Image (cartoon, grey):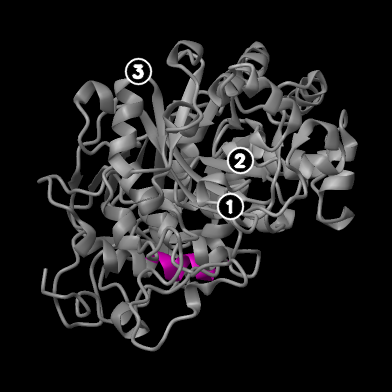
Amino acid sequence: MFSPILSLLLFSILPISSSTQSTINVWPIPTTFSWPHPHSILISPLLTISSPKQTYLTSAVNRYRRQILTEKHQPRAPHVINPTFTPSLGTLTLTVYDLQAPLHHGVNESYTLSIPAGGRTAAVAKITAETVWGAMRGLETFSQLVWGDPPRIAAGVFVSDAPVFAHRGVLLDTSRNFYEVEDILRLIGAMSWNKMNVFHWHITDSQSFPIVLPSEPDLAKKGSYGAEMEYSVEDVKRVVEFGLEHGVRVMPEIDMPAHTGSWAEAYPEIVSCAHMFWWPAGYAWADRLAAEPGTGQLNPLKPKTYEVIKNVIKDVATMFPEPFYHAGNDEVTPGCWKADPSIQTFLANNGTLSQLLEIFVNSTLPYIVSLNRTVVYWEDVFLDADVNVRASLLPPENIILQTWNNGPSNTKKIVSSGYRAIVSSYDFYYLDCGHGEWLGNNTLYEQPPGTDQGDGGSWCGPFKTWQLIYNYDITYGLSEEEAKLVLGGEVALWSEQADPTVLDSRIWPRASAMAEALWSGNRDETGKKRYPEATDRLNEWRHRMVSRGVRAEPIQPLWCEKNPGMCNAQPI
């Protein structure tokens, strides 16, 4: 992967009042884009895409050929680009040097793309990539350079492109509310358009256990919301295969030892404080039994706990080939374990809650590693003030920590301790924030008129705008060596107040903002933040995503899309 050279020629939107523009919008913006003489050529209706034979590449080639010939995208602000009536573009040739490289973290996703200027002979465009996955990224860029009916493409273009960060993901919580497989596939498809490459599937939580595991079928049978709200082995296979066809890894998360109330439906004997009210009357906040409604934490002192866990881990590792296994380890709530009689005895004999968590980690981490998995934990296992595990028991070579609290401060703590980090800082990357409190019978709203509404009751409010997301530098405050330990980032949609009816609009186009920031950076070649010119490109990109079937929310009135640059706070 080469270092990006941000020579972003001809991508700036000029502050003009015309309803036309002479730019081509590509999202995320390539690291190098050259188009010295803007013009376009037609694409032949008999376009052929010549590529090596490889299962997932062939699927992508067929998909993109259909899209290129049938999308007929009409930009909101029509392009003023000189048409060239030369022979049409008849062939796109793909050259891939390594057809065997698996879709794992750090795989080479670079590519080059050249589209000829036209001439007297039939034009041939070329994509060259080291791997299949880089070729897929090049195909997406090629598709975004096409518009019109009949379809035409920007000509005389050269692109050299590669990501800044190797991990660019979306987390979706399918426990609190259920999502059909079709919803997940639509999400993965949109991720591939945005050159995002990790679907973090937060499958289970205290509210439900929707995945059917062959070795532990009762966990879903008794812990899901119902048979119609479960993911079968075949469903998972379909999601994983669809991900591979679109260059998106599927990383499973089975959260434990906290967030496991749903396990108690099948195994009440291994779950502490199950089926209890989460914050009993008269209890201090520090003594609550769970982070939110839905109590239950696995009891690390019960041998049966590990019998069940090992079956779960074995099945999940078999169903998901992804080398990263997310094992949760967040929000261990002291009050829950303290309410368990067996743990009370342990604590009375001078044991501590941190020692209890260390017992759990020591009994599960080696097994996950033995399955050739790198373990991803939430930062809490290391940074929580009350219940944590010593660094000596968390080998950096086996563990990645995902940060969600305190922004750059916690990222700094993680990487300065030698751990690799995935950044999901809630004050920038949580897409569910800003929709108010979801607890019932809450005196927070018993206020007289004129009361300061603050963040409207949302614990992580306000709403995270695309501009906030775009401008977040995930390596802020880090040394050059520390920054190398930041693998990338993920936006997260937790589903207390989300389900399929709002999935697209909660995620898109805000996730697109992170996608560009992590692919090519949020600064231009001079080091200046480029969110001003990004607004018009994101407007156009959102329009194209909607036309492709994803109901992304608008970021401005339609008038602004038709008049690029006219809705800025100040001229660019």
| Residue 297 image position (x, y, % from top left) | 69, 37
The earlier-in-sequence mark between 1 and 3 is: 1
Range shown magenta: 541-549
Q: What kind of residue is marked 2?
A: Gly
- Magenta span contains residue 259: no
Q: What kind of residue is marked 3?
A: Gly
Tell which of 99 and 472 is nearer to you. 472
The earlier-in-sequence mark between 1 and 2 is: 1
**What is the CA distance from the residue labelled 3 to the residue labelled 2?**
31 Å
Above-or-below relation of 339 to 466: above
Q: Rate crowding at label 3 as few (under 14), some (14 to 19) or many (20 or more) other CA atoms within 10 Å.
A: some
Residue beneath disc 2: 335
Is 168 on the left or on the right of 524, as rendered? right
Circle 3: element type: loop
Residue beneath disc 1: 283
Instruction: Tell which tag, 3 or 2, sits nearer the viewer.
Output: 2
Instruction: For the N terminus, give its image quadrant.
Output: top left
Instruction: Tell which tag, 1 or 3, sits nearer the viewer.
Output: 1
